[in-house]
Every structure is written in structure tokens, then in C-alpha cells.
Image (cartoon, rainbow, N blue to C red):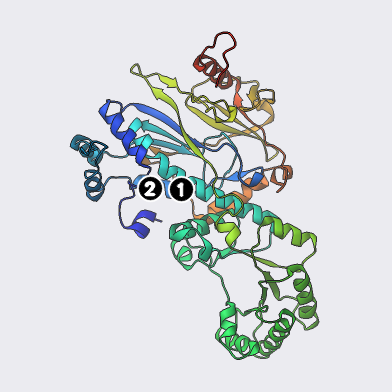
Amino acid sequence: MKITQDLYKGSLALLTDFYQLTMAYAYWKSGKAEQEAVFNLFFRKHPFQGGFTIAAGLDYVVDYCKSFQFSEEDLNYLATMNGKDNELLFEKGFLDYLRDMEFSCDIDAVEEGTVVFPNTPLVRVKGPLIQCQLLETPLLNIINFQSLIATKAARIALAAKGEPILEFGLRRAQGIDGGLAASRAAYIGGSTSTSNVMAGKLFGIPVSGTHAHSWIMSFETEIEAFEAYAEAFPDQAVFLVDTYDTVNGIKNAIKIGNALRSKGKEMLGIRIDSGDLAYFSNIAREMLDEAGFPDAKIVASNDLDEHIITSLKVQEASINVWGVGTKLVTAFDQPALGGVYKLSAIRDEQGKWVPKLKLSQQSMKINIPGLHTIKRYFSKGKAVADMIYLEDQELNPQAALIIDPNDPTRRKRMMPAYYEEEILLKPIFRSGKLNYQLPTLLEIKERVQTQLNSLDKTHKRLVNPHLYPIGLEENLHNLRMDLVLKSKPSHNGNESEK
């Protein structure tokens, strides 16, 4: 799907933060624009206090990079910008450089739908420094949001234990593109359909929906409204029963269900959108069963999320289908993933990769240096650990030691003879040319389920999940520690670091 062409009809090169352009200009001005660099996109902590994250958005990234180019309109706008001295901010030579620039980066990424963990690169960008820098904001914008929503959907699907999840959050989503991206990511993560018709058209997601309270209120009586709806949609009648009185609404739905049956049709079910969902769903199930409709589904909605669904399951609510909107598409309890994009290496004049490190007094904010990648270990089909290691580093063939990047006392010895292995970063672009066959949305969705099945159930707990082992290979850990010690300023006497 060509997102930029289909939705925006033009260049998205200016979908960026201003400081990316000022840095790009300074790189060009100082002669560093073409120096080769490596950046990694990763996150430091799982969203929702969970034990896993679902990588999503790669399809958008591919489309963005394929069409990455500054248009004449973009350049004309940049040419109008003035600095603090009221002089033009960007020289004409720089704008000419941007006009002629062709995307030429190598991009490696974990495949969309992969279960991922903190500190491991989701996307690695290698290429001219100026291009790598200009990709930072759009890549973060795409990957952060879609990974967040896909993860939320996966958690909701786990709570629903295989029962259908209807996503209908468009009216509460964060704008037009937020609504579309959310519907796509939610489907990847585990929803079975969407109310978002444009998402259905663009992405091929199954579309579902019945009627609102306004439909019923537009008639003199509830039963007239049900009757008219059944006349319009005899093969897919689901009745919203809580407009006035839920129990009476169920009775009216049963009456129309009998009328449909007399015509050789079958009522699909009812929907409850307010009140005590556990209580009314159980009453509904009893009434429907007694009336001869044991197969009629009970759809529940009303600000649902994984925690409310879990609670309703514990209460043995008779709900078969879950309608989830606001709390899914807005990631209600955590509005952002918090992914970052950091320089990890730069090539010097001799062609050697020089590892780069950002220091911080918070150990979790010290980035991982060098040109590194990720390996996942499996035992009997279950993922047991991820190792981050230097791509050009020779590994111990008998056993690799991995060390937690935030707590060096947490260590694990990985012996290849006992595990299957998979390199998670896949080549997506090489020298700006697409090198990857994009999967269908359904294939990505199926990958999520395969990936989740590979995790031990303790990592999928919604509350206090068991930590999945992620570690730096010993050589990479040592490199990082050496750079930390070399980079820290020395202090004399009792002077303390601020």
C-alpha cells in the first residue's frame, strides 16, 4: 500500500523536527554530510508495565523511504526561513544538495509482528550521516505509535482468550492518520475487525458494525427499530439492547429473532454497551438460551481494556465478542512507547567503524555502541534469550556469555549446541534499494501469534510479568564499559559528579 501517495499526495520529507534540518545543514556546512554512520532505533522499557512489545510499522517505513525526496515546494518553503539575524537560514547550495539527494541507506529491521524487548534495535540505519539524521523523526513517529497499539491489541487479545475483538475506536483516535494507523496496528496485534471503513479499504481489514443508540431513538419504539433493522439486514442482525431498559431490550431482540427465524433467517446476537456487563450478559445468556437462541452471541462494549476483560472473565460473564475502542486506539494508559534513535558508530577516514557512546547518570540511558545486531535463542520452539552482539565480532563457538545491559550481575551462558538460533535484523534496503519482500497484513498478524506462542506464559502475564533475558555479548559489554570509563571526566578530592 502506497501510504504517501494514497493519503497525502505528495512529499513527506518535512514531516520532521526542525533540529533535524539545522543539524543536516551543519553536517553539510562542515563537510560531514556524506560520512557514513549507523543509528539504531530502540526502546528502553516495555509499555503498559508488560513483558513484551510487538514491532509494527515497517510497511510504513518502507513506503516512506522509497518516496523520500524533497519536493520543490519543500525547498521553496525552506528558502523562506530566516535566522535570528533576519538573514536566510539555509544557503542555496544546501537546498540544491537536498534537491539532488537520493536515498542510499542500508536499513535492517526486525520483521513486523516480531516480539521485541528493551535495548534491542528494531531498526538499524546505515548510510550517509545526513540521511540517517533526517530519517530519525519520521521513523520514530511511525514505529513508536504502531508498535504501541499493536502491543495493546495483543494484550487485549490475550485477555479475551481467543474470542473476537472488534476495534471501533476511530471516533476517539488521534486524528485521521492516527485512526488509520491504529486500526492497522490493532489488527496486527490481535483485533479481528475494525469499524474504520477507510482502513478496510486501504489495508484489507475486515469491517464490522451494527447500529447505534440513535437508530433506536429515531423510532417511536425499540421494537420498531429492531424490526426495521432486521428488515434491512436479515443475515447480520445484532441488536443494541441497552438504549432504555436492558432486560426489556433483550426481550424485544428475542421477539425479532423469532420473526427472523420464521423467515429462515437467524439473529446473530445482541450488544450491551452500558451498565453491569457481567450481570446483564449472564441474564441475557439465560434468556437467549431459554428462548432457543443458544448460538446468539453477546457482544460487550463500554471502555473495555485488557484489565476489565480479565475482570469480566473472572466474574464468568457470558460475553462472546469484545468491542474495544478508546482504550485501544489511544493506548489509554500509556500514550507513547518512548522509542529513541541513537548514533552508535561512525566510519573514520581510514574506513574503520568507530563506536559512539552517549553517557548518562542513568545506566538505562547509556546507549549500546558499535555496529551490532540481535540473535534469538530457542529451545524446543520456545524463545529463551536474546543476545546483542557486534556484527563483525567472532563469537565463542562453544558458549556465549550475555550480560544484562542495565544490571551486569544478571548473566546467562548460551551454548549453541543446545539451542536453535535466529538473526532478528533482516536486510530491508541496500544502498537505497528495497531488498525485502513485504508480507501481507494477514501474514504479519499470523506472525504475531506465532511469536507470542514462542514466549513462555510467564512473560505474557498482564501484571508483574517475568523478565525475558536480554544481554550484551561479553565482548560488546566490555567495549561499552571501556567507553564509559574513558568518557567519564576525572574528579579530584571530594569533588562529586553533578
**SS state under label 1:** helix
Residue most extreme to the left: 92
- Which mark, by number, is residue 494? none
Q: Position of residue 149 (x, y in %)?
A: 56, 52
Circle nearer the viewer, 2 or 1: 1
Coordinates of residue 415 in the picture (x, y in percent)? 67, 25
Q: Specify the farthest residue to the top.
A: 493
Circle 1 is placed at which residue position?
A: 142
Decide if residue 149 is on the left or right side of residue 319. left
User: On screen, 425 above or below 360?
Assistant: below
Quadrant, the C terminus: top right
Q: Which residue is mark 2?
A: 64
Return the x and y of residue 1 as percentages of the image width and height: 41, 56
Label 2 and label 1: CA atoms lie apart by 10 Å
Amino acid type for the residue under numbered disc 1: Ile
Tell me, yes or no, whether the two marked residues, 2 and 1, touch with CB atoms within 8 Å: yes
Q: Secondary structure at mark 2?
A: helix
Check the image and report above or below for 339 versus 313. above
The answer to which image quadrant residue 295 occupies is bottom right
The total of numbered circles placed on residues is 2
Q: Nearer the viewer, residue 451 or 208?
A: 208
Please report whichever mark, 2 or 1, sits nearer to the chain's N-terminal start: 2
